[in-house]
Image: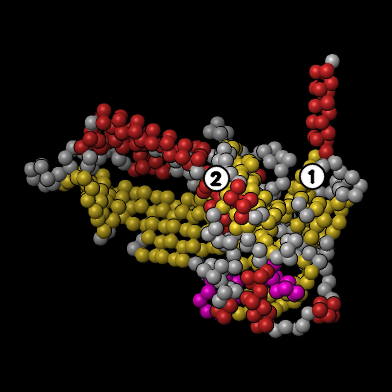
């Protein structure tokens, strides 16, 4: 009887917990243009809130019993704040109206500063406006990689090895995936000073890795075929001359390659080494990610050595004061900037009219950040853009709320490649075999990062030192997007590319 009561009580607790949790999904749009509103804040209280993605979409989980007093508060730069009762909320669209600014109201408490004076005050207040001391930040981080093989051609011009022919090369090239994407998502808490280069500690609650394992390119079958070709046609004491145009190098052949037992031994050692690397990779997952996240939250205009130097080196940019906007019940200046000469970025600053803190910046490059093109080898960093949003904390200082960035690069090679086998121990001509090809590759890589900080609570140095890391979480592999994986957690709503991610089986 007592056991029955215990089980019944447990079920009641579980049921109450389940029924008290509710998720709300919707899309935020402009009332006039009917366009999505990105980066809107959706909050229940100071500790529960998310930000809409670039399509205006969001999903928020409320982990408590809903009452008639509970509301969603939606706010966004330039729009009227909206309050919606949660209890009976069923809409899939939330409409925000732009907020009209009464300039006379702004100027009652704010002098009509020139753009030069505003910039001077921004710089003078940088150190005081932003809180970079010890904090515990509860956050969600997403990092996505997209690779597109635009061109991948290898033309065999000459070959003395019959098996190494154009059909064989074509089969190798067809095995290389043309488009791949890879997404890592992390929910956790980061401890330490926010300022750059400060050591950090982290606790990861949950993580996922969304990618196609079949796109982890392995050439095991082709490696065996390559090895068989070499053993059949190439002499043990030969060496290779590798040439590309004017450039060349010499490579000796390891004679142990022809020893089957040695090859088997090296293969076994390689496999064990790979397993050890994999083990270490899992152990270092937390270490690598906390460094990555901390670096990303410091990729801002606050550092002197940042490439986002439009504040530190403002004399190199042209600033224009456009108008005023309204954000979180406060007025902000809207200021655009662009390079005067050789700088890289243009964008928009939103500056609080009272304390001259930059509360948001949108930026993008106006020209390639780096480019190289010589003798058929090319490289371009053609894209870097993003958004950074700060909010005021209880100490009247600002901490990071949201950041995203998108980085694009393109690599190309269009050159001849010739491999010649030579042997000095053979009478007559030293040249034994020759393979001549033209290779032409163009690869485009894009990296997108997103970070939302749900809470940023001050901690003491002693609290930081007393926290002990436990690196016991590694990402869960997901072969396709699973909306259930993050159910019950607040995250950044994924974009359409992630939602559409699915591995297509060969038989499909």
Q: Decide whether residue 16 is among the magenta residues.
A: no
Left or right, 279 with reference to 139: left
Q: Residue at x 57, y 44 (%)?
A: 469
Q: Residue furthest right?
A: 68
Foreground disc of the pair 1, 2:
2
Q: Where on the picture, by quarter, is residue 313?
A: bottom right
Category of crowding for the residue at label 1, using alpha-carbon neighbours closer than 10 angstroms: few (below 14), some (14–19), many (at least 20) = some
Q: Residue at x 70, y 84 (%)?
A: 114
Category of crowding for the residue at label 2, using alpha-carbon neighbours closer than 10 angstroms: few (below 14), some (14–19), many (at least 20) = many
Q: How far is the residue under mark 1 from the one under mark 2?
A: 28 Å
The quadrant the N terminus occupies is: top right
**Picture disc at residue 15:** none
Give the percent coordinates (x, y) of residue 60: 76, 47
Q: Residue at x 50, y 51 (%)?
A: 148
Per the rendered image, the range of residues in magenta is 338-360
Give the percent coordinates (x, y) of residue 402: 67, 58
Would you place residue 121 above or below residue 240 in this image? below
Nearer-the-camera pick, 483 or 331: 331
Nearer-the-camera pick, 408 or 394: 394
Q: Where on the picture, by quarter, is residue 122?
A: bottom right
Q: Residue furthest left?
A: 427
The quadrant the C terminus occupies is: top right
Nearer-the-camera pick, 17 or 179: 17
Q: Where on the picture, by quarter, is residue 339?
A: bottom right
Nearer-the-camera pick, 33 or 326: 326
Residue beneath disc 2: 286
Q: Decide whether residue 347 is among the magenta residues.
A: yes
**Picture disc at residue 62:** 1
Left or right, 404 with reference to 260: right
Give the percent coordinates (x, y) of residue 465: 58, 50
């Amino acid at each position: 009887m007592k056991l029955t009561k215990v089980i019944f009580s447990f079920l009641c607790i579980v049921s109450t917990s389940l029924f008290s949790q509710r998720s709300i999904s919707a899309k935020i749009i402009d009332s006039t243009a009917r366009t999505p509103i990105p980066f809107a804040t959706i909050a229940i209280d100071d500790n529960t809130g998310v930000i809409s993605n670039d399509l205006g979409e969001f999903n928020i989980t409320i982990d408590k019993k809903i009452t008639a007093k509970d509301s969603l508060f939606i706010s966004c730069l330039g729009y009227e704040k909206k309050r919606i009762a949660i209890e009976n909320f069923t809409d899939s669209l939330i409409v925000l109206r732009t907020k009209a600014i009464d300039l006379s109201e702004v100027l009652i408490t704010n002098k009509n500063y020139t753009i030069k004076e505003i910039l001077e005050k921004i710089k003078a207040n940088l150190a005081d406006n932003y809180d970079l001391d010890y904090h515990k930040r509860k956050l969600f981080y997403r990092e996505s990689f997209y690779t597109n093989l635009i061109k991948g051609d290898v033309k065999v011009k000459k070959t003395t090895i019959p098996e190494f022919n154009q059909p064989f090369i074509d089969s190798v090239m067809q095995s290389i995936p043309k488009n791949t994407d890879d997404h890592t998502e992390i929910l956790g808490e980061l401890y330490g000073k926010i300022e750059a280069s400060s050591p950090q500690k982290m606790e990861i609650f949950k993580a996922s890795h969304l990618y196609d394992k079949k796109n982890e390119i392995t050439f095991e079958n082709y490696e065996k075929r390559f090895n068989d070709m070499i053993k059949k046609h190439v002499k043990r004491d030969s060496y290779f001359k590798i040439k590309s145009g004017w450039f060349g190098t010499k490579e000796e052949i390891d004679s142990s390659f022809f020893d089957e037992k040695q090859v088997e031994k090296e293969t076994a050692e390689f496999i064990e080494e790979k397993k050890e690397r994999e083990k270490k990779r899992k152990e270092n997952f937390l270490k690598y990610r906390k460094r990555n996240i901390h670096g990303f939250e410091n990729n801002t205009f606050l550092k002197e050595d940042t490439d986002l130097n439009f504040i530190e080196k403002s004399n190199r940019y042209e600033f224009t004061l456009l108008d005023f906007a309204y954000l979180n019940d406060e007025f902000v200046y809207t200021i655009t900037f662009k390079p005067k000469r050789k700088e890289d970025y243009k964008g928009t600053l939103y500056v609080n009219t009272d304390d001259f803190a930059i509360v948001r910046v949108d930026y993008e490059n106006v020209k390639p950040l780096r480019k190289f093109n010589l003798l058929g080898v090319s490289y371009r960093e053609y894209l870097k853009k993003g958004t950074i949003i700060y909010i005021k904390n209880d100490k009247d200082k600002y901490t990071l709320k949201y950041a995203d960035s998108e980085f694009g690069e393109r690599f190309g090679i269009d050159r001849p490649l010739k491999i010649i086998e030579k042997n000095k121990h053979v009478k007559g001509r030293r040249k034994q075999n020759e393979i001549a090809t033209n290779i032409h590759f163009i690869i485009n890589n894009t990296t997108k990062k997103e970070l939302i900080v749900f809470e940023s609570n001050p901690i003491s140095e002693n609290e930081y030192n007393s926290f002990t890391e436990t690196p016991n979480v590694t990402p869960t592999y997901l072969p396709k997007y699973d909306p259930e994986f993050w159910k019950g957690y607040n995250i950044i709503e994924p974009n359409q590319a992630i939602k559409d991610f699915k591995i297509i089986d060969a038989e499909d």
